[in-house]
Amino acid sequence: MTDFNAILRGLDDLERLTLRGGLAGLDRMAVIYERAMQQDPAHGDVTGATHANYAALVVGPGRDTAGDVASIVAVVESLNPGESEAGTAEVDGIGVILTSATSYQRDLETQYAGNKAVLGPTIAGAGEDFTRAAAEGMREALR
Amino acid sequence: MSIDYAAILGSLYDRAASASAGATFRATLGGASSLFLATLLPKWRDPATAGRPARVWAVWRPGAVGGSSGEQRAVTASWWLYDDPARGTYRLDTALTALEALYGIGARHAIAHGLTRVVFIGQVFTDDALGLTGREVRISYDRRG
């Protein structure tokens, strides 16, 4: 006789493992992208705040990144007081937010047709890498 | 088949800058000299500079390439549209609409062996250094290579 409860438990486990694996894969790739943005030579950095606060935040069930956002705001305030700015975003499922908490980031991203942009070009090139990282993490989790 | 980035970016640029398909888009710009490379922007910073092109401008800047060798690649570039703040956003949006037609859903196979798309339309911003309002329209050419 079919044990439907066992099937449902298995499906729950599958979802849980898949999400966990996807998050682990995104975490690995986020470290790489965060470091790259923090070393990006597209612009200078008088106080050090601009580079130090670039962040790749992995979001998903149980990970709302509020603490991470508070951390990067604190970084900006410690290096360049009064220049922090933060907002909110919602991600369905799992994902990554590439962001900065300086009030002048918008200008860096747009002036002279993006001559000093970091987030825009990074986001444009990151999709394939993060998608592959999430898929690899899921595959590892399901082995 | 390896990817020829120069050929792809050249094709993406030419589609707006010189191809017959881009005539409607070019008609939304200020004039023949209003379409140029981003490296020339500092030259036109001062509104009093002689020969400064009429707005609307379309400024070309190649962007990042996503993906890894042998897998799916995304070759990106942006047209940055600029206008005088006093003109509001209507002319910018008219140019934007023409760009969407050039690279959007009806032109996905405009460049061989890949998929051409508009992947990002930025919000209107003010560039204080130029004294102009602007919008970014980012395009992507995706293919394996």
Image (cartoon, coloured by chain):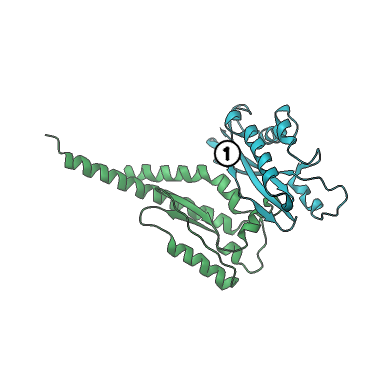
Chain colours: A green, B cyan
Query: How far across and down, in percent of the image, does residue A91 sit?
Result: 44, 50
Name the residue tied to disc 1: B74
Q: Nearer the viewer, residue B4 or B62?
A: B62
Q: What residue type is labelled 1?
A: Ala
Relative height, residue A73 to residue A21 (above, below): below
Query: How far across and down, in percent of the image, does residue B9 sit?
Result: 68, 36
Q: Which residue is drawn at 73% across and 52% down?
A: B86
Left or right: where A86 falls relative to B22:
left
Position of the N terminus of chain B by quadrant: top right
Residue B109, quarter of picture: top right
Q: Mark 1 lies on which chain?
A: B
Q: Nearer the viewer, residue B91 or B37?
A: B91
Position of the C terminus of chain B by quadrant: top right
Relative height, residue B19 to residue A23 (above, below): above
Relative height, residue A20 to residue B19 (above, below): below
Residue B32, quarter of picture: top right
SS at mark 1 in the image = strand
Q: Can residue A56 be seen in the rendering of this structure?
A: yes
Query: How far across and down, in percent of the image, does residue A134 sit?
Result: 43, 45
Left or right: where B24 falls relative to A26:
right
Crowdedness near tag 1: few (<14), some (14–19) or many (≥20) residues, C-alpha within 10 Å: many
